[in-house]
Image (cartoon, rainbow, N blue to C red):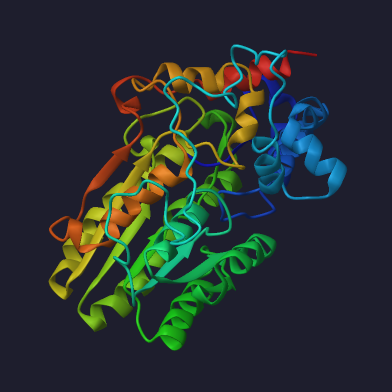
Amino acid sequence: MTVFRSASSRAARSDSSSGSSACSNAKSNTASASWAKTFNCAARVAGTRLWARVGDRSPAHGLAKQTGITIGDALTALAATPSSPTTPAPANDHSSPHPNRAPPTTYDAATDRPEGSTTVAGRLTGQSALVTGAAAGIGRATARRFAAEGATIVAGDIDRDGLGRLAHELGDQVLTQYVDVTDEGSVEALVALALERTGRLDVTVANAGGGLAAELIDLTLDDWRHVIDLCLTGVFLTVKHSGRAMGAAGSGSIIVLASLNATQPGRGMGAYCSAKAGVAMLTQVAALELGPAGVRVNAIAPGLVMTSATAPMRDVPGVVDEFIENAPLGRYAEPEEIANVALFLATDESSYMSGALVPVDGGARTRRYPDMIAGIERLLGQG
């Protein structure tokens, strides 16, 4: 699940042509795309200062605005701040501990691996792993997890500041480079960096993505193309150039981030669902074509994963509640839980898996997808 913005809902159709087109001008290929930009776009469409009502009400965004730190750092700071025992959390506040919520992942100081891990250390020692969208969220968690297993990380993102923080944390174990996954030359250069600096490319995680929420009759062609370019064409380019390098070496594992929406439709999700369904089929075609060269290709289909990019969804009435109600496990995922599955697919423990779409959604695919448009309409109606 990646960050979404409202292009033009029925509640905001009066200026959908000019407003939502303006929103599409600034491209993003990372799951850590700014929700401030997201809601400002929606505000221009709706003719109201939506961000003032939404973003500033979020504690993380308020802290970031006051101090100048990033949203991700604000979320981390707030998570580390003890809550007052005399002030109970609201019933729908999913930032508070949930009875079925996965405990936060902590890392052992001596090994830099998740505490309590029962796996053998160093499963990726000596290997090179390329990760797109690595500055935050699932991408960052995957880069950290792979680094803890000994891999050299080649991290790409459009968020230079986020890449800088990752480099500070992982030190000499990571190489960072700006990458726009919709630009073939940019993707080719990232793969070249891996080959030039490490001499090999063993694993690629095509994680960069993003989306918007708009019903089909309100969706502009520019916004449609933006989502398809980012979520489908970006994956194609990453698979293409990684597959060439791995095929020449005779081995490798490519892991693609698809989505629950690859198989489950959602209102207002036409572009995103189409792109992710395309990613699922692209994964199968890539597995078919690259398999003879010793390259495995698999996809992960997460449900809602709470990251700095998706956290503001808490402020859209009822949406996070619907996600939790429609996941039989009764909670959302943490980024580390997706990273753990990516690690499995990266190693020889999954040596006979290729062309698979692995759901990591708490069972949400057995029920229904939340109504994003209804949530946005409720939000716009709050006055």
The answer to whether 328 is drawn above or below residue 120 in the figure is above
Residue shown at 48% from the left, 81% from the top = 193
Q: Which of the 4 quarters of the picture holds residue 369?
A: top left
**Image quadrant containing the C terminus:** top right
Residue shown at 45% from the left, 19% from the top = 99
Instruction: Inspect this view and state whether residue 19 appears.
Output: no
**Horizontal side of residue 306 vs 350, given as left or right:** right
Q: In front here: 190 or 101?
A: 101
Rendering coords of residue 40 (x, y %) = 76, 38
Q: In front here: 381 or 190?
A: 190
The answer to whether 239 is drawn above or below residue 264 in the figure is below
Q: Which of the 4 quarters of the picture holds residue 92?
A: top right
Residue shown at 59% from the left, 24% from the top = 96
Instruction: Inspect this view and state whether residue 381 appears.
Output: yes
Rendering coords of residue 225 (x, y %) = 53, 50
The answer to whether 289 is drawn above or below residue 266 in the figure is below
Q: Which of the 4 quarters of the picture holds residue 121?
A: bottom left
Residue shown at 35% from the left, 77% from the top = 201
Rendering coords of residue 294 (x, y %) = 17, 72
Rendering coords of residue 203 (x, y %) = 33, 68
**Horizontal side of residue 178 vs 262, given as left or right:** right
Q: In front here: 9 or 102?
A: 102
